[in-house]
Amino acid sequence: MKVTVLYSMKGCPFCDMIKEELKKNDIFYIDRDIHEFEDEYDTFVEATDNEYVPAMMLLTLDNNENASDVMLLAPDRDFQDIYEGVNLVKEYLLD
C-alpha cells in the first residue's frame, strides 16, 4: 500500500492549500503536525536539509508494515508550488 504523509503546521496557509488540493484529487494522506511529531520531523529535516512546510514523505508499506520506496519531498527543493507537489504525489501513487 502506498502512503502519503504530510508534514504541516497550524496557521500555515500553504499547508491548508496543499491539504485542500490533495482532497480535491481524492488523495488520502496522513497529516503530521510538525510540533506534535517534532522528533519525526527533525529526522525529515536532517535527511532533506530543508525545514519548510508543507513537506511530504511518500512510501510503500507491505503487509508487515515494512517501508520501501521512500521519497522525501521538500518545498523549494523538490517542488516549487503546491500543484507541482501534488502532481509528484499523483505520479508516485500511479507508479
Image (cartoon, rainbow, N blue to C red):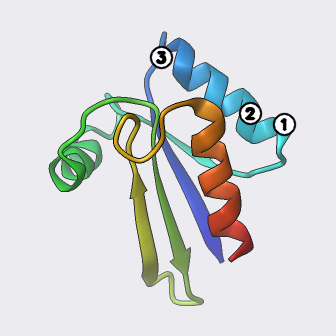
Q: Which mark is residue 21?
A: 2
Could you give the CA–CA distance between mark 2 and mark 3, rounded to whole angstroms? Answer: 17 Å
Query: Residue at the spot x=69%, y=67% of the render?
Result: 93
Query: Disc 2 vs disc 3: Cβ atoms closer than 8 Å?
Result: no
For the residue marked with disc 1, what is the amino acid?
Lys
List x then y, in percent, for residue 81.
55, 30
Q: Distance between the residues labelled 3 and 1?
A: 20 Å
Q: Quick one: SS at disc 1? A: helix
The residue shown at (60%, 54%) is 88
Which residue is identified by label 1? 24
Which label's residue is closer to the chain start, 3 or 1?
3
**Residue 16 left/right relative to 28:** left
Residue 2's x, y, as percent? 63, 72
- Callout 3: 10 Å neighbours few (<14), some, many (20+)? few
Mark 2 and mark 1 residues within 8 Å of each other at the beta carbon:
yes
Name the residue tied to disc 3. 10
Q: Which amino acid does label 3 sit on?
A: Lys
Secondary structure under the numbered disc 3 in the rendered image: loop
Residue 10 rendering spot, x and y as whole percentages: 47, 16
Q: State which tag comes first along the sequence, 2 or 3.
A: 3
Q: Which of marks 3 and 1 is in front?
A: 1
Which residue is found at the position 20% from the left and 52% from the top?
43
The tally of labels here is: 3
Circle 2 — which element? helix
Mark 2 neighbour density, 10 Å: few (under 14) some (14–19) many (20 or more): some
